[in-house]
Structures are given as structure tokens and as C-alpha cells.
Image (cartoon, grey):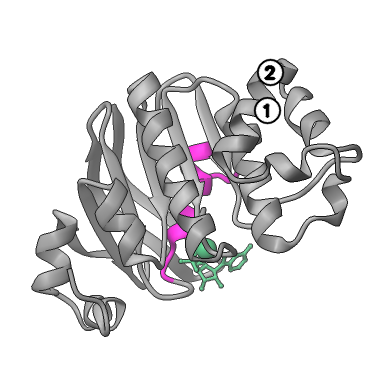
């Protein structure tokens, strides 16, 4: 379980995150939405232990994996980029196929496009086991097909390990197709929290309305 109490993150005198109470039950999948600067990355980084909170308490499971918004490639080909996390070559090939990158397996990872690199970084993460999976906009650089493959891979990983998943996204499709809960952040505060289909069909906030404009479910 992930348990947040009286959490605040401040930069100088500016509070960018203010969450009185928030619990993520084991095995649940939550999408975090909200405009740029609403605090999604800050929340994920605090949960990942990358940055410190200013106030409050945060409890997370022992094993946590985090996919940052800015993905990176190591030297070497795609297979090497995955096996350096501990996976064997066969596992790496299976993941590359799943994410539609198998035809690029022996290419240099540093030559990939943004969307390809994002999927490679996800392969590296999904080659390991964890109790809490944190993903920062995992489909942001992907085209429609890439986003669909990412969604399927996240769903399969969740199915296999039963882990808790929290992912930020601007994609209503990812929220609806993967998450059972959608939390909308606005200026560091929770504006809406509920089933994605409920929030998307009856937005509680102005921002949720813009998130769903042009989107029919
Ligand atoms: N290191 C930092 N110093 C000062 N302000 C920061 C820093 N990191 C993030 N912020 C601010 O915190 C707010 C939330 O940022 P972020 O969590 O990245 O938003 P989101 O991921 O929702 O776009 C933004 O206004 C951002 O400018
Ligand atoms: Mg962000």
C-alpha cells in the first residue's frame, strides 16, 4: 500500500504539492492527470524517493521502479540496453517484440527516435520485478500504435506481478484502458478522484473538461 499524509512540497515560499491524505491500495492502477505544472512529476519523484518532501509522511513498498519523463539510452544496441538491468537476452527480445522494437534490436540505442526511446526505456523497466511501478507520461512521445503497445505492456506487467501502478498521463485513452482510478491534480491539489469513466463523462473541474474535450468514451 502507498500511504500519503499531510504531504507538502515547497520551492522557496511556493507550495507546488499539497495533499492532506491519499492511499493507493495494493494492486491498483491509477492515472494522474493535470495541466503542465500541476505537480504530477513532483508527486511521482517523491514516491520514487528521488526528491525530498517538505512536510508530511509517505509510505511506499520496498521495491519501486520509476520511468522518468525524459528517457535516456545507454551506449550499445537495444538488447544491451535491456540486459544491463539484469535481464537475459531472451527476455530482452520478448520485451522488444512486445513494444514493437524487435526489428531495431541490434541498432544503436542512441540513434532511436523519441517514441522508440521511450518504449526502450519502458522495456528496461519492465524487465525487472517491483511492487510499485511509477510511470511519468509513458506514452507522451509515442504515436497511436506505440501508445497502444505501451498500454498493453503495462497491463500485462500488472497482470503478471500484481503490482501497484501510478502513472501520469495526458492521454484519456491510457487512463480509460489501463487505470481503474483517475486523480486530477490542479496547482498541486487533488481536484478530482474517481473512476476514469465517471470523471471523463462528468468532469468535476474545468481542467478535466479540457482533458476530455473531443474525446468520447
Ligand atoms: N526544482 C524545482 N525548483 C523550483 N520549482 C520547481 C522545481 N521542480 C518543479 N518545480 C515547479 O513545481 C511545479 C510542479 O511541477 P511538475 O511536478 O513538474 O508538474 P507536472 O509534472 O504536472 O507538469 C511547477 O510549477 C514547476 O515549475
Ligand atoms: Mg511532469
Residue located 14% across and 61% down the image:
197
- Judged left or right of residue 107, residue 31 is left
Residue located 46% across and 38% down the image:
153
**Numbered circles on residues, count:** 2
Note whether 8 is above or below 97 in the view shown.
below
- Measure the C-alpha gap from mark 2 to mark 1: 5 Å
User: Magenta includes 146?
Assistant: no
Q: Position of residue 5 (x, y in %)?
A: 28, 41
Q: Where, quadrant-wise, is the N terminus in this rendering?
A: top left
Disc 1 residue crowd, few under 14, some 14–19, many 20+, Cα 10 Å? many
Q: Which residue is mark 2?
A: 90
Residue furthest toward the front? 103
The segment highlighted magenta reads 38-53
Instruction: Say if mark 2 contacts mark 1, CB within 8 Å.
Output: yes
Question: SS for tag 2?
Answer: helix
Q: Quadrant of residue 201?
A: bottom left
User: Magenta includes 44?
Assistant: yes
Note whether 195 is above or below 64 in the view shown.
below
Residue located 72% across and 15% down the image:
88
Which disc number belongs to residue 171?
none
Question: SS for tag 1?
Answer: helix
Q: Which residue is mark 1?
A: 93
Amino acid at each position: 500500500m502507498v500511504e500519503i499524509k499531510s504531504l507538502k512540497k515547497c520551492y522557496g515560499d511556493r507550495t507546488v504539492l499539497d495533499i492532506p491524505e491519499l492511499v493507493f491500495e495494493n494492486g491498483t492502477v491509477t492515472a494522474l492527470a493535470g495541466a503542465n505544472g500541476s505537480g504530477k512529476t513532483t508527486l511521482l519523484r517523491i514516491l520514487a524517493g528521488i526528491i525530498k518532501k517538505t512536510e508530511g509522511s509517505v509510505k511506499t513498498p520496498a521495491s519501486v521502479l520509476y520511468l522518468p519523463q525524459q528517457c535516456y539510452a545507454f551506449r550499445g544496441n537495444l538488447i544491451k540496453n535491456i540486459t544491463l538491468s539484469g535481464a537475459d537476452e531472451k527476455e530482452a527480445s520478448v520485451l522488444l517484440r512486445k513494444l514493437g522494437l524487435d526489428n531495431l534490436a541490434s541498432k544503436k540505442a542512441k540513434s532511436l527516435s523519441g517514441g522508440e526511446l521511450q518504449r526502450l526505456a519502458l522495456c528496461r523497466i519492465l524487465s525487472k520485478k517491483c511492487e510499485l511501478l511509477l510511470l511519468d507520461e509513458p506514452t507522451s512521445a509515442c504515436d497511436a500504435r506505440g501508445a497502444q503497445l505501451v498500454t498493453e505492456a503495462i497491463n500485462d506487467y500488472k497482470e503478471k506481478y500484481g503490482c501497484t501502478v501510478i502513472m501520469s498521463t495526458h492521454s484519456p485513452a491510457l487512463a480509460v484502458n489501463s487505470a481503474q482510478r483517475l486523480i486530477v491534480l490542479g496547482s498541486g491539489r487533488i481536484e478530482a478522484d474517481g473512476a476514469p469513466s465517471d470523471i471523463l463523462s462528468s468532469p468535476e473541474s474545468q481542467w478535466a473538461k479540457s482533458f476530455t474535450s473531443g474525446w468520447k468514451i
